[in-house]
Image (cartoon, grey):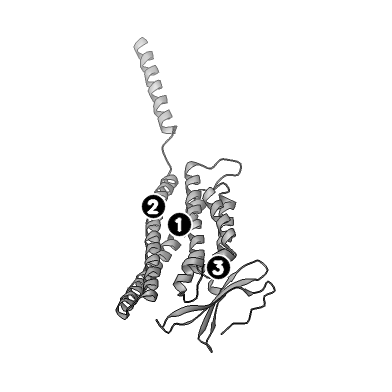
Amino acid sequence: MRRTSEGVWVGFVLLVAVILVACGPSGPSKQELALQEEFEALQEMQAELVGKRQELADMRMELVAAAVEEVEAETEAVAEEALEEEVDLAAEIEALEAEIAQLTDEYGGRLVGALNANPMIEGEEPSEMQQALISMKSEEDLALATEWIEKGGDYKRAIEIYNAALAIDPGNQKVMAALAAAEDARYMKAELFEQLKKGMSPEQVRAILGQVNLHNIREYPDRNVVAWFYPTDEAGGAAAVWFRESKKTGGLEAYLIKFDAVSSQGEEAEEER
């Protein structure tokens, strides 16, 4: 009987152990594993985007340099060589921009999907993955806002993106700094505008002032003139650069530069010929 009793007791202990193992933690769920896999894929996509965007930035700088070289060329042969380089670079830039746009859409959509699949609970601190996803979203917002400024000259849209990012990630120092810089650069300053000189190409003007807002470019076909307007205040004032065809290069060159081209009442100063 003693042996039987001990055997039953040992058997009972083993049974309890098996039950505890079966009912204990079983590791990450399928949903958690899928989210981790998606998170790692997003990290790879982010790294790819960063690399391609840097490549694009470098190519754009090369394009500006080639354009400046063409304008300043002392011989026709050098000017033609620079022009050929411009054409080739422009085609490469266009192809890379399309590639980045497609990757950006995919990455942005999947990033938002991952955030929605792993929502934060009000009153609780975000998990390590949640915070990582939020930081990735802020980094992407920074990149998108920068593109709106550098390519479209649209500070208003960029500021909206920064503010939306801070609503989700209020302590992000990078976003706060970028917002402050955008607000500071939103309106043209006289000391910066004074660096312009007559005869400058659009590329040279852009290198100093930054990209003009595409909505603030006006064409005057009757005179073959193009004007770029840069807001100087919230009330509607604007500085302007007028371009016309260069007799030397055939391209555009600045021939009139006015900081007070448009008054705060929205009245455009008369163009000098």
* Left or right, residue 242 beside residue 250: right
Hey, which quadrant is residue 186 in on the image? bottom right
Q: Position of residue 150 (x, y in %)?
A: 48, 65
Q: Which residue is mark 1?
A: 110
Q: Are marks 2 and 1 in contact (CB under 8 Å)?
A: yes
Q: Residues within 10 Å of mark 1 (few under 14, many from 20)?
A: some
Q: Quadrant of residue 180?
A: bottom right
Identify the residue under disc 3: 193
Q: Is residue 268 above or below residue 181?
A: below
Residue marked by disc 2 = 41
Q: Earlier in the sequence, mark 3 or mark 1?
A: 1
Q: Residue at x 39, y 55 (%)?
A: 45
The front one of 53 and 234 is 234
Q: Residue at x 68, y 68 (%)?
A: 235
For marks 2 and 1, the one nearer the N-term is 2
Percent from the top left, x then y, of residue 74?
34, 77
The amino acid beneath tag 2 is: Ala
Q: Is residue 187 shown above or below 226?
A: above
Q: Secondary structure at mark 2?
A: helix
Horizontal and vertical percent position of residue 105: 45, 63
**Image position of 209 (left or right of 65):** right
Tell me residue 221's x, y (percent).
52, 87
Q: Nearer the viewer, residue 219 or 247?
A: 247
